[in-house]
Image: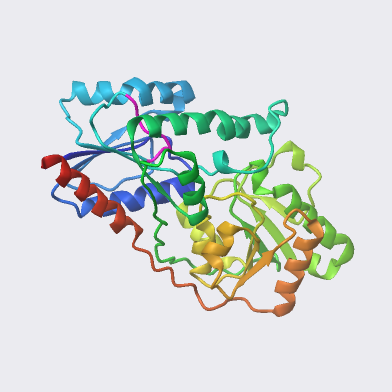
Amino acid sequence: MANIIIYDIAADSYGALVILNQIVREAEHDKANDYYIFLSSGINRTHGNLHYIYINKKKGLAHRLIWDLYGLKRYLKKNFIMPHLIISMQNMALLGFHGIPQMVYLHQSIPFSDFNLNPMKKEERKLFFYKYVYKIMIFLTINFTGSRVYVQTEWMKERAVALFRKSIKVKKIAPSIEKQEGIRNAETNNKDFLFYPTSNFKYKNIDTIIKAIDYLKVYNPEIYGRIELRLTIDKDPKYCMASDNVKFIGYQSKDDMISLYENSSAMVFPSYLESFGLPLIEAASIGLPIIVSDLPYSREILGTYDGARFINDYMSKRAWAQGITEVYAEGRNRYKPLIWNNEGWKVLFNDIHSILHNRKR
């Protein structure tokens, strides 16, 4: 029986926790091995071969980096746990584990982006760090340890292959999708609502979709009067002039997200950078109309879905307003659900067993 480390103390967003839950669920069936799962929150599942170690992420980034560099190794040594394989879900390999094979789930797309960032702008400094500094850390740790790399989409695979040395193996593993079981509720404000599951980053293109609603207010008041845009972020002062038809509903739990999918009339997704875009699959799996930026990530996921309307000029408020108008003019509330057949986690666990088998030889 081997000891396998799953390291994901940074996971706290909806998408990251969905992915972590999926890999843990697969690990439950691997009774031949013990899994030590380092995390900060989000999982209540227990099983005989799963061992949870909760790390207090609230202490800040410095504490997390200390854990990455020293804390994990110290904990394993103190508790007499000899790791045979490490799975890092945090984009980087872990240093200080010479001779122990590692697998890195690389899901941060910002280092592979093409857009420019200005570190002098406060709202862009974090993205600048991820694009340039974090990219170097990813490059160095993975090349130094010779880790295997797993990404979510073909476009990420192409960028990763170009970044790392030729001996680094890169594979695509798309997330699986759970069956959505929500309840449709009657809305009390007589409006159809558009849903955008998002975070408050520049590349999410929130400004453009808010301006599109304002554009409808002036040029298509009939459609404007029917709709309400709901964003899963808290209201930022920079959006203080947003239309009354734009609602900031904050972070949503998994159950609340399912309810939003079920009760929305359409989903908008103006983001111009995604490693995968999990909400797209979740929405398409229930047949929800989707208006989305026309980019490689969206084409890869929704290319065969009839309910997708791709916006080529995704920085144009007018283009988004036109897309929204066309969806409502079409009058279709639901499409044939997209069937997402994916066995990516089987690929990962086959590799786990192959690595462990080769170590025994």
Q: Is residue 49 visible?
A: no
Residue 134 drawn at (x, y percent): 52, 31
Residue ID at (40%, 42%):
166
Residue 327 drawn at (x, y percent): 70, 72
- Location of residue 172 with respect to 90 vertically, above or below: below
Residue ID at (24%, 54%):
350
Residue 70 drawn at (x, y percent): 33, 20
Would you identify the image quadrant in which residue 332 lies? bottom right
Residue ID at (28%, 58%):
346
- Location of residue 168 with respect to 304 vertically, above or below: above
- The quadrant the C terminus occupies is top left
Q: Is residue 122 visible?
A: yes
> What secondary structure is the magenta-colored segment mainly?
loop
Residue 204 drawn at (x, y percent): 64, 48
- Location of residue 158 with respect to 218 vertically, above or below: above
Task: Give the magenta-colored segment's residue range.
Answer: 89-95
Q: Nearer the viewer, residue 146 or 321?
A: 146
Seen from this angle, which residue lies furthest front?
166
Instruction: Indicate whether residue 91 is drawn in magenta.
Output: yes
Would you identify the image quadrant in which residue 77 lies? top left
Q: Nearer the viewer, residue 17 or 7?
A: 7
Q: How many marks?
A: 0
Apparent side of residue 204 relative to residue 162 in the rendered image (left or right): right
Instruction: Indicate whether residue 184 is drawn in magenta.
Output: no
Q: Nearer the viewer, residue 297 or 288?
A: 297
- The quadrant the N terminus occupies is top left
Residue ID at (30%, 26%):
72
